Amino acid sequence: MRVLGVDPGLTRCGVGVVDSLSGRRAELVGVGVLTSSPETSTDLRLLRISEGLETWLTEHTPDVVAVERVFAQNNRGTVMGTAQVAGLAMVAAARRGVPVALHTPSEVKAAVTGSGRAGKEQVQRMVANILRLPSAPQPADAADALALAITHLWRPAGALQGGDRHQVTPAQRAWAAAERRAQTSSRYRTDVRGKESPR
């Protein structure tokens, strides 16, 4: 199984892809952070994050997208942006027929460290240990995304959204992703001056 973990955030959105291996092991495929500037309007910030999520989904063709379940916090502005980005991730996955799994922060901590009250540093250390990395990915959003992916590999039951509506096989998703890449590249042509312009 390949899982794309998404730690939603409007300024920094962590993304991490992990493959399952035999013997309850996991392997890092890719990790990164999608960013948007607070100085930009919210609609354009969401567009930037959305485009980044689409790129990760197309390039890695995950079997499941694991997203952190958003809870209300004291900072209403922060939770609003987090919820909006979580929605973008869910829609992007649903558009491809990829199941979405929601995991709470305490579920992630318990799955990765054995304690639902573990601190961020402990989670980061365990992510590095599980994936056999020399150090935890930085910033913390990247490590959190990997922790979400690992959580779903180890605790998949009861978290999936969409029920039986997801009947697309990994091979079919890979084929669809290849078609999308081809369509995207064909939207542009190079003119006689060597500049790209829309068709």
Image: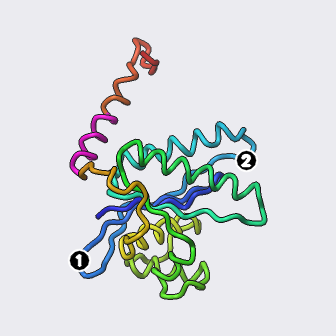
The residue type indicated by label 2 comes to: Pro
Q: Position of residue 67 (x, y in %)?
A: 50, 61
For the point 48% across and 51% down, the residue is 90
Q: Position of residue 17 (x, y in %)?
A: 39, 61
Q: In which quarter of the image is residue 42?
A: top right
Of all residues, the one furthest to the top in this rendering is 192
Of all residues, the one furthest to the bottom in this rendering is 114
For the point 31% across and 66% down, the residue is 19
Residue 185 covered by magenta stretch: no
Foreground disc of the pair 1, 2: 1
Name the one closer to the observer, 118 or 190. Answer: 118
Reply above or below: 121 against 66: below
Name the one closer to the observer, 14 or 192. Answer: 14
Q: What is the magenta segment's predominant secondary structure? A: helix
Reply above or below: 168 against 187: below
The residue type indicated by label 1 comes to: Ser
Residue 178 covered by magenta stretch: yes
Label 1 Cα neighbours within 10 Å, binned few <14 / some 14-19 / many ≥20: few
Q: Where is residue 191 in the image (x, y as percent from the top left)?
A: 41, 14
For the point 45% across and 80% down, the residue is 111
User: In this figure, which residue is indicated by the disc labeled 2?
Assistant: 38
Of all residues, the one furthest to the front in this rendering is 164
For the point 63% across and 54% down, the residue is 83
Numbered badge on residue 22: 1
**Of the residues under marks 1 and 2, which one precedes in the sequence?**
1
Classify the position of the N terminus by image quarter. bottom left
Element type at marker 1?
A: loop
Numbered badge on residue 7: none
Q: Give the range drawn in magenta.
A: 170-181
